[in-house]
Amino acid sequence: MTDKTLDNWKYYLREEHNKPKYKGAGCIIFCPDKDCMLLIRRSEGSFNGELASTGGGVEGEETPFQTAIRETIEEVGKDLSGHEPLNEHEDITEDGIHLTFLMGSIDEFPCSLNSEHDAWGWIDIDEVKMAINRKSGRLISNNFFDREGKKIEVDAKIHSNTIDALKEFNL
């Protein structure tokens, strides 16, 4: 066996080679006391106009959970550091794995949206379930706020990854 062949075998047998390739991560923020969850509407980039949870791409050597915490701070202005996830959902694609964490919140909080989003709202879980089951993921609600805090009505599709995670979390 040549040195090159031996090196190739060592590479394929290393633990690092077999680790999952995390592409991104995010948080579904659930307020159990009020039985509602936070949804934000994308205003730019991929999935423009869709409702989703916080989330984005893994940077550098971040763990998926570190990514989810950073993205939540960046996108809605809430630091969930120190909180433990209640559950997690893996969405596996050909590009890699997106991990969604279910995070509990003590109470609803106002959001400070970044430029990637233009609306946020705490939506009753039953309203979200109805949108998923009866309207193919389309949610119409007047429980949203724009960047300036003005109440608005939103008519938008819930992102498929958020729907999949909610189903796995039995919410």
Image (cartoon, rainbow, N blue to C red):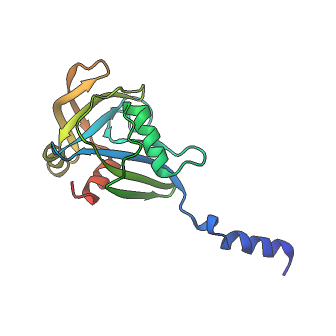
Residue 138 appears at what percent x and percent y? 21, 41
Residue 74 appears at what percent x and percent y? 44, 32
Task: Please say if 57 is above or below 149.
Answer: below
Q: Quadrant of residue 106?
A: top left
Q: Is residue 89 left or right of residue 171?
A: right
Residue 30 appears at what percent x and percent y? 25, 45
Residue at the (39%, 37%) spot, across then down? 79
Residue at the (17%, 49%) spot, across then down? 129
Nearer to us in this view, 69 or 98: 69
Residue at the (22%, 36%) spot, across then down? 122
Q: Quadrant of residue 43?
A: top left
Nearer to us in this view, 57 or 44: 57
Nearer to us in this view, 45 or 13: 13
Going by the picture, which residue comes out furthest to the bottom? 1
Going by the picture, which residue comes out furthest to the front? 82
Task: Please say if 24 is above or below 48.
Answer: below
- Quarter containing the N terminus: bottom right
Residue at the (41%, 27%) spot, across then down? 114
Going by the picture, which residue comes out furthest to the right? 2
Q: Is residue 149 left or right of residue 60?
A: left
Residue 160 appears at what percent x and percent y? 32, 49
